[in-house]
Amino acid sequence: MYDYDLLVVGSANADLVIGVERRPGAGETVLGGDLSVHPGGKGANQAVAAARLGARTALLARVGDDGHGRLLLDSLRSAGVDPAGVLAGGAPTGVALITVDPSGDNSIVVSPGANARLTPADVRAAEGLLRASRVVSAQLEIPLETVEEVVRALPSGTRFVLNPSPPRPLPAEVLAACDPLIVNEHEARVILGGAGAGERPEDWARGLLALGPRSVVVTLGAEGALVYDGSGATRVASVKVDAVDTTGAGDAFTAALAWRLGTGASLAEAAGYAARVGAAAVTKPGAQESYPTAEEVRAL
């Protein structure tokens, strides 16, 4: 019935990374190492992560008609993502400018570029992609009005998963469609309004569920995740690994969870698998380059 296990609607960026001895202060110039360019963006990351695991995956996104856009399209195709929904032109490809110091701390400036031009009209034009997809996943590196249109256009029987990153207050219409809403601590506190969020993941999950989602997953890094669907909270353990680079691990988690939900797994089962995928991803440097195959996940 479905052509795709997962349709990701979201961002595609080129990550421009420079290592520095220390980050510059105001008005200061510092010398850095060689520039490296990597395919990134939360939408493209999720699509690549799911495809690497074996999911039939498509991406609805916008890139520029430029070298960075071609880099992203090449990365998607090599991972097995169907790029039919990737629209090119109209603005430069989105770029993240990243400086990293020797301790691993980074500073990031994002130029959304073409991501900001992914419009509700693009979603309406992609009706066929939506109808052909078992699960649809989105994030907030594209306009919120575009995510709202995804929710309105969602076919009956298609599941919607949202990772609200970067976080912002969400309209009730979007919250009500989430099954689940996937957040880390920072995202949970922003959506809950901070002060009344409580101190425990169970508090955040309960508060978020009261806002209207059908289910909530709180990611807890090395501690795994907490799933909550109204029948109670379930802790999901992660796998202990030696972390090398956590970049993009949350995107791998979300992609794996969304895909497994579409195969009929329960929320707790899907989150357990996603925690293993996230753990595998942090054992290698980079985002898309670090994402594991299903075989690598089984070997953990």
Image (spheres, helix red, strand yellow):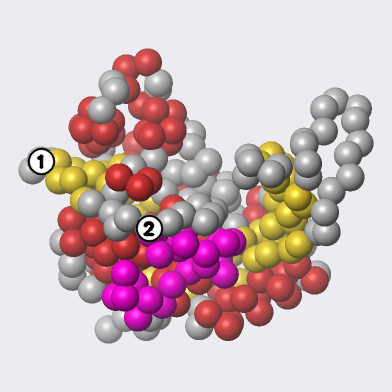
Q: Earlier in the sequence, mark 1 or mark 2?
A: 1
**Kind of element beneath mark 2:** loop
Disc 1 marks a residue whose amino acid type is Gly
Query: Is residue 299 in the magenta section?
Result: yes
Please, what is the three-letter code of the amino acid marked with disc 2?
A: Val
Q: Quadrant of residue 262?
A: bottom left
Judged left or right of residue 274, residue 36 is right
Numbered circle sitting on residue 155: none
Quadrant for the N terminus in the image: bottom left
The verdict on residue 108 being magenta is no
Q: Say which of 297 and 201 sits in front.
A: 297
Q: Quadrant of the C terminus?
A: bottom left
| Residue 201 sits above or below residue 178 on the image | above
Vertical order, 271 against 296 (above or below): above
Range covered by the magenta-colored residues: 278-300
Tell me which corner region of the image, top left, top right, bottom left or bottom right, holds residue 70. bottom right
Q: Can you say whether 168 is above or below 163 in the image?
A: above
In the displayed orientation, state which residue is furthest to the top.
Answer: 195
Identify the residue at horizontal 58%, vertical 76% (top origin): 76
Q: How many marks?
A: 2
Q: Nearer the viewer, residue 154 or 240?
A: 240
- Toward the left, the furthest residue is 231
What is the x, y in percent for residue 98?
71, 48
Q: Which residue is mark 2?
A: 241
State the separation of the CA atoms marked 1 and 2: 29 Å
Give the camera-side residue of 16 and 300.
300
| Image location of residue 275, percent across then percent down | 31, 57
Q: Is residue 121 placed above or below 66 in the rendered structure?
A: above
> Is residue 53 rendered to the left or right of residue 9?
left
Q: Which residue is mark 1?
A: 232
Describe residue 67's horizontal placement relative to residue 263 as left or right.
Answer: right
Q: Is residue 213 visible?
A: yes
